[in-house]
Amino acid sequence: MIVDKIKKREPTAKRTENKVDIQIGKWIKCDKCKEILYKEDVRNNYSICPNCGSYFRMHINKRLETIIDEGTYKRFDLNIDTTNPLNLEDYPKKIKSLREKTGIQEAVSSGIGKINGQEVVICVMDSGFLMGSMGVVVGEKITYSIEKAIELKLPIIIFCVSGGARMQEGIISLMQMAKTTEAISKLNEAGLLYISVLTDPTYGGVTASFASLADIILAEPGAMIGFAGPRVIEQTIGESLPEGFQTAEFLLEHGFIDKIVERKELKDTLYKLIKLSSGR
């Protein structure tokens, strides 16, 4: 048979393994320009792509590092933990897994620190923890921080990033909208400065409550901000929407936010606003 006449080709040389010296977890891909970047280079550049300038989302610790004076941040020691009001089997497991993965306990960190020597209460949300969703613990930490600002007569800054209320906690998560809004009302009565910084993305119940109630609303370039997604809105109202209508740039043009600030300029901008507000 012809198959028997076919001689197997012998390799002329042994194949060598194509080893590439790339450490696992050391590289990241930019979704905008598709460039493969060294994580440490991105981190040292304020988590901004050095190739195209697009913004990566920031971990709580990195955000505090770029905004708060070194050694001045004191986290509020709140003895509260996430509950499982709907008795979902996987919810506690998910929370435990996220804590191990992210190194943080919840989707927000709150405390007191200094910005160029000016003392402030600051809250920072993190999209890496259930997309920064607002459950009972997040709502309580935000409310406690506002009350602490009133007690200490300090300005408060909240860095917002969220997909909305936490569906795993049902109606109780939605109640946090009312709770945080009432706290902001008391802050306003006390005549204290509140600055909200909207980062990508800020959606849902967070946008519909404390994120939109600040005296001054700042945003990072390109941040997506809204209540519901574009498709949901179009299906609800039965109309087509303007392109990019939920970007920070569109919202600035239409008066929803006060200023878009580059990440590298945020600390100095916040400092100037605090100084201006204090009149000193």
Image (cartoon, rainbow, N blue to C red):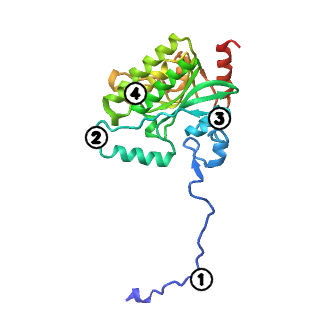
Q: In x, y percent, where is residue 150?
A: 53, 18
Residue for badge 2: 87
Q: Amino acid at mark 1?
A: Thr
Q: Earlier in the sequence, mark 2 or mark 4?
A: 2
Q: Is residue 158 above or below residue 94?
A: above
Badge 2 vs badge 1, beta-carbon distance below 8 Å: no
Badge 1 crowding class, 10 Å Cα cut-off, few under 14, some 14 to 19, many 20 or more, is few
Q: Amino acid at mark 2?
A: Asn
Q: Amino acid at mark 3?
A: Thr
Q: In x, y percent, where is residue 132?
A: 46, 35
Q: Is residue 188 above or below residue 179?
A: above
Residue plotted at (59% across, 72% down): 17
Q: Amino acid at mark 4?
A: Ala
> Which is more foreground, mark 2 or mark 4?
2
> Which is more foreground, mark 1 or mark 3?
3
Q: In x, y percent, where is residue 171?
A: 31, 28
Where disc 1 sits, the SS reads loop
Label 2, label 4: how many angstroms apart (C-alpha)?
Answer: 27 Å
On the rendered image, what quadrant is the C terminus found in?
top right
Label 3, label 4: how many angstroms apart (C-alpha)?
Answer: 30 Å
Residue for badge 3: 66
Q: Earlier in the sequence, mark 1 or mark 4?
A: 1
The quadrant in which residue 203 appears is top left
> Which is more foreground, mark 3 or mark 2?
2
